[in-house]
Image (tube, rainbow, N blue to C red):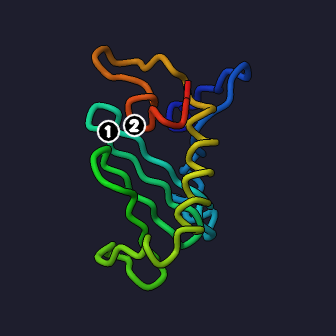
């Protein structure tokens, strides 16, 4: 929207930030403190909180990576740090609770497909 110089409607929250100032070099700091991804059609999701990356594929237990020491996400440390996994998942659940439950593209399901046990809308 910023690229097209179109104002955003003020009647809803937005998931994202205007990246143009970062691309222009006007801001040097990180554009996000947290990033979340959710690919509903494949049951995959990830949460990047601080230096932690929690990855879910919908079929296996969560994987946790320390991006400060393992940027390539090669070593799952979830069994050594369950509290970081839990904390990142709490942040992800909070984010998901703010997302629309009816997706824009037919055929995709909502967050309940990824975490039915969490009772998300």
Residue 54 lies, in percent from the top left, at 45, 60
User: Which badge, 2 or 1, is on the more N-terminal residue?
Assistant: 1
Q: Is residue 92 left or right of residue 10?
A: left
Which of the 4 image quadrants contains residue 70?
A: bottom left
Outermost residue toward the right?
A: 10
**Mark pair 2, 1: CA separation:** 5 Å
- For image coordinates 60% across by 45% down, the residue present is 17
* Element class at badge 2: loop
Q: In the picture shown, does residue 55 fall above or below 100? A: below
Residue 96 lies, in percent from the top left, at 56, 37
Frontmost residue, 58 versus 2? 58
In which quadrant will I find the N terminus?
Answer: top right
In which quadrant will I find the C terminus?
Answer: top right
Q: In the picture shown, does residue 74 fall above or below 46? A: below
Frontmost residue, 69 versus 7? 69
Q: Which residue is mark 1?
A: 43
Mark 1 packing: few (<14 Cα in 10 Å), some, or many (20+)?
A: some
Outermost residue toward the bottom?
A: 69
Frontmost residue, 118 versus 23? 118
Residues under numbered marks 2 and 1 in contact, where contact means CB atoms less than 8 Å apart: yes
Residue 79 lies, in percent from the top left, at 43, 73
Residue 62 lies, in percent from the top left, at 40, 58
Q: In the picture shown, does residue 91 fall above or below 95? A: below
Image label count: 2
- For image coordinates 63% across by 32% down, the residue present is 98
Rendered image: mark on residue 33: none
Mark 2 packing: few (<14 Cα in 10 Å), some, or many (20+)?
A: many
- For image coordinates 61% across by 51% down, the residue present is 90
- For image coordinates 36% across by 23% down, the residue present is 109
Q: Which residue is mark 2?
A: 114
* Element class at badge 1: loop
């Amino acid at each position: 929207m910023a690229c097209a110089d179109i104002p955003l409607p003020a009647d809803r929250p937005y998931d994202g930030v205007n990246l143009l100032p970062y691309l222009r070099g006007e801001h040097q700091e990180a554009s996000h403190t947290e990033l979340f991804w959710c690919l509903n059609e494949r049951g995959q999701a990830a949460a990047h909180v601080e230096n932690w990356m929690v990855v879910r594929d919908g079929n296996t237990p969560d994987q946790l990576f320390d991006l400060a020491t393992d940027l390539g996400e090669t070593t799952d440390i979830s069994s050594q740090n369950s509290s970081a996994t839990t904390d990142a998942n709490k942040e992800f659940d909070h984010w998901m609770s703010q997302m629309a439950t009816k997706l824009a593209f037919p055929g995709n399901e909502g967050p309940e497909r990824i975490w039915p046990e969490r009772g998300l809308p």
